[in-house]
Image (cartoon, rainbow, N blue to C red):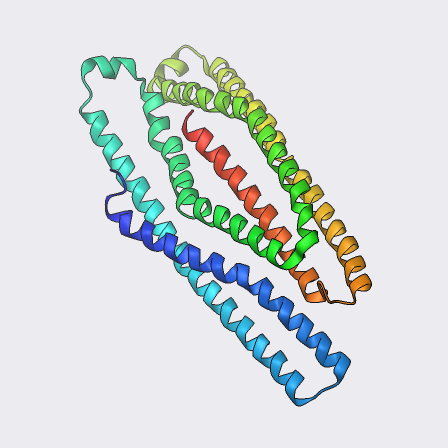
Amino acid sequence: KAIRRQRQMCIRDRIFITGEVFFEVLIPFFTADLVNAIKAFSAAGQEAAGLHDVVKQGLLLVAMALASLGCGSVAAITCAKASSGYAKNLRHDMFARIQSFSFENIDRFSSASLVTRMTTDISNVQMTFMMLIRMAVRSPLMFLFAVIMSFIMGGKLSLTFVIVIPVLVFGLLLIAKKAMPAFRAVFKKYDRLNESIEENVRAMRVVKGFAREGYEKQKFAAASHDIAKDFTFAERVVALNAPLMQFCVYFNMIFVLFVGSRIIITNGGTTIDVGQLSAMLTYGMQILMSLMMISMIYVMLSLIHI
């Protein structure tokens, strides 16, 4: 209901994201043909025919890169407008709903909790909505298309993803599971922190009149330190994504380069060639990065349900 006028922007955003992913996945495929054409041109020493193929492949790659850039730029603009409009509508609807609260509801919800709902929570919802209409469309499509293209081009080299993908998925799920309790604790403590600030602002004369500044500073510092401790633990757990990602990326590179070079030397480039080897490295990065984005979406969606 809060989407309202942003519905058309969301549809356009998905169309342009699909186009961006389509061109990004095709670029390594044609880059492999370009590398193979350059290799054949250098080996044969033919001037006219070989150079014509190289120029043709290069211009095609430039056109696809520009098309991908255009689709990505339009998708980013529409995504930003849709998410900002969605947050504006949601904030308006929440404010109108709060104004219609009965006295029972007013007594049930504290003002500090309502302030948190209207500020921090809506900001998180806006970020999650942005990721849903952009990353949640882009990442699964990138993962699916890249896996299909890698199996089409790589053959035996694609077996590396049978090992890397389950390891990365299991690690990301474990990290998210460990980090979620800390995030839950942080968001519950935000209400207490806002309540402490509100009490100090409203009763500033009372605090000064009874010389309670030191006590109020200690109370606020304790609440702030408690939030910082939980948030630091959660961020440390989430930071494990980076080394896990690097491990999977470098394992994929070593496997593809080692096995692929042996296949090229053994078969003389008849099964796969240097171009396919470079494309497999690119597809590996696309697959692993899409999995990383999916894990971030999972964390954001979990925060929304807190």
Q: What is the residue that sits farthest to the bottom in this orientation? A: 48
Residue 48 placement, left or right of 215: right
Q: What is the residue that sits farthest to the top in this orientation? A: 210
List x then y, in percent, for residue 102: 18, 17
Up the image or down, 284 lies above or below 87; here it is below
Q: Which of these two is toward me, 224 or 132?
A: 132
List x then y, in percent, for residue 202: 33, 20
- Which quarter of the image is occupied by the N terminus? top left
Number of marks drawn:
0
Query: Would you identify the image quadrant in which residue 88 lies?
Result: top left
Q: For the point 60% across and 28% down, which residue is it?
A: 174
Q: For the point 68% across and 47% down, which residue is it?
A: 159
List x then y, in percent, for residue 189: 46, 20
List x then y, in percent, for residue 286: 58, 52
Q: Which of these two is toward me, 176 or 200?
A: 176
Q: For the point 69% across and 39% down, which residue is it?
A: 243
Residue 72 placement, left or right of 198: right
Q: Which of these two is toward me, 266 or 297?
A: 266
- Which quarter of the image is occupied by the C terminus? top left
Up the image or down, 120 lies above or below 87; here it is above
Q: Which of these two is toward me, 227 or 42?
A: 42
